[in-house]
Amino acid sequence: METTLVLLKPDCVQRNLMGEVISRFEKKGLTIRGMKMLRLDDSLITEHYGFLADKPFFPSLVEYMKSSPIVAMAISWANVVKTVRTMSGATNPVEAQPGTIRGDYALSIDGNIMHASDSEETAKEELERFFEKNEIFEYERLDSKVL
Ligand code: UDP
Ligand code: MG
């Protein structure tokens, strides 16, 4: 069982789209194993997006990520990292296909609704960054036998 990190970014929270996005993961059949609201600070954002620190848009990315609480989710299933990236759509919503989360709900790269880990290795690091071990739950879903 693979687990990935999803962040519902400030624009998702502010535009009342949390339920819409969470619902997509539920309807797909993925298992939500952890979920919490938190407000990011400079150090957590810099750790998470450090690889972008030299980009001209980095200061505005930091301000955006701090502008509102976000929701962090730990989501599991076989191949979930790739599955959730596919559901998310391209980084730039202008290029994201209709039917993807960014394709359906976002208009600009400055507010692209969600983050999803981009590899199994990144997912492990990112889950440790956002969740304590006891905040990610092992449980069997009633519907797991029919999926
Ligand atoms: N970003 C931005 N402008 C850019 C590229 C990226 O504001 O030109 C932001 C955007 O919020 C994006 C995040 O930086 O989601 C991380 O970039 P990455 O390339 O990792 O894209 P993602 O994995 O989110 O699709
Ligand atoms: Mg990324």
Image (cartoon, grey):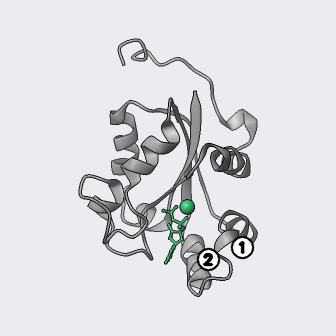
Going from N to C along the chain, the mark reached first, 2 or 1, is 1
Above-or-below relation of 22 to 91: above
User: How far apart are the two marked residues, 2 and 1, measured between alpha carbons?
Assistant: 7 Å
Horizontal side, residue 143 vs residue 63: left or right: left
- Would you identify the image quadrant in which residue 90 lies? bottom left
The answer to whether marks 2 and 1 mark residues whose Cβ atoms lie closer than 8 Å is: yes
Residue at mark 2: 62
Q: Residue at x 71, y 73 (%)?
A: 42
Above-or-below relation of 52 to 98: below
- Would you identify the image quadrant in which residue 39 lies? bottom right
Name the residue type under label 2.
Answer: Val
Residue at mark 1: 42
Q: Residue at x 32, y 68 (%)?
A: 95
Residue 27: x %, y % from top left:
33, 34
Residue 129: x %, y % from top left:
72, 52
Name the residue type under label 1.
Answer: Asp
Residue 125: x %, y % from top left:
71, 49
Q: Residue at x 43, y 72 (%)?
A: 111
The answer to whether residue 34 of the structure is visible from this angle is: no
**54, 114: nearer the viewer:** 54
